[in-house]
Image: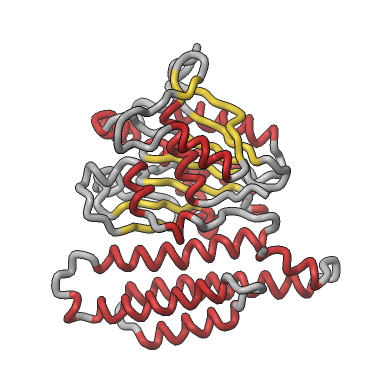
Amino acid sequence: MPKCTIGLLLSAAHIAYRIVGKDNNLREEPREGYVSTAQLMADISNSGYLITEKTNADVALSNGLTAVRLEPLDNESPIIISFRGSDSLRDVFSDLYVILTGTVGRKLQEDAFSFFKETKKAFPNREIILVGHSLGGHLAQHVGAIAYAEDPDLIKSRSIHVRTFNTAPVDSRHGRWLKDKHPSIFTQFCNYRLDRDVVSQTPVKQYYGNTFSFCTEKGRFAAHPLRAMREVIPNSVQNLEIGGTNKVQRDLNTLKEAVLGIKEAYAAHIKGQWFSKFRMGSKNKKIIDETLDLVTKELNEDPPDLGTAKVLLKLARLGTHGATSHECLKFLLEDVEYVQKEYKELLASSSVSSENAYEFHR
């Protein structure tokens, strides 16, 4: 069965940079130190996916959009749409100006949403994951916000996921409306960034959903490319699955992602505090690391032991000090309680047998 993981989404975001020419060909990448196109395609194939639709700025009547659609080899796993970012850092800052002023680029945003709508029409009942790096991350967030704001059924099903990497900031009336009317929908959005990335560190730090930062010693510009993210993001995170065959499985996978993401994000939070070893930061980190490792173990049990996970988080809150650590643990505790409630409702449902109820975590 296909596996839609963070690692696959990194490759999906990466492959969008290799689409060129009027025929949407995939170019090779011969430069040393870069990930080859063959390797990216192997990653996609080994995950049980294939590319079924491509477009780029060189095709006739293009407004500059480069995007790719990946489909799984089964009829249940999520569809993936990847939007390409900018080819150079000089273009990045040009694009940021466009995004922040809103004076140009609207057509690009419209084309990105049209690409999504065509996919949604072809797969009306499937989960769709929107992916992008840099400017591509902006487009993924923008499209996701419009999709949820304009379709009440999506608010109920929560079948659109957004995952971005070192994303450019985003702001839209659809996003502002969602924040006001349906703020919980942003649990479907998640941004991955390296803590020294030059683009996601811009003064306008406006993103939708959770943002997980990962520590790196790379320079501000060297931390931006996807190849840097592939090197830094640990395998434990890259192997996390996104989505699922039912809502409870999807939410459990999102919870697992949040646990590991917050562990890395807290490490990035206290990084640079040269006197942290004399403060509660380092003590909190030790407690958080040990607790979240144990919570991950409980969530990976078959079936997941959500009760023990909840107890572990409560004990960690009692043992840590400071607003940031408490907020992180409170966030996870609320998520565990939410998934636990869903699981109990699933077991209690008269239409679902106990045997079938366990399918969500497999």
Front residue of this view, candidates 230 and 148: 230
**Residue 226 location in percent, x, y?**
36, 42
**What residue sits 36% from the left and 87% below the top?**
319
Residue shown at the point (19%, 75%) measured from the top left: 276
User: In the rendering, at what x and y percent does residue 128 appear?
Assistant: 60, 43
Q: Is residue 152 visible?
A: no
77 lies above or below 15:
below
**98 left or right of 127?**
left
Q: How many marks?
A: 0
Q: Residue 77, position in %: x, y?
A: 66, 47
Quadrant where the image shows the C terminus:
bottom right
Q: Seen in the image, is 351 located left or right of residue 279? A: right
Of 134 and 100, the residue lying toward us: 134
Q: Classify residue 75 as left or right of residue 283.
A: right
* Residue pictured at 68% horizontal, 40% vertical: 73
Q: Residue at x 25, y 77 (%)?
A: 282
- The answer to whether residue 360 of the structure is visible from this angle is yes
Q: Quadrant of residue 348?
A: bottom right
Q: Residue furthest left?
A: 274
Pinpoint residue 327: horizontal percent, then vertical percent. 39, 73
Q: Does 301 sit above or below residue 48?
A: below
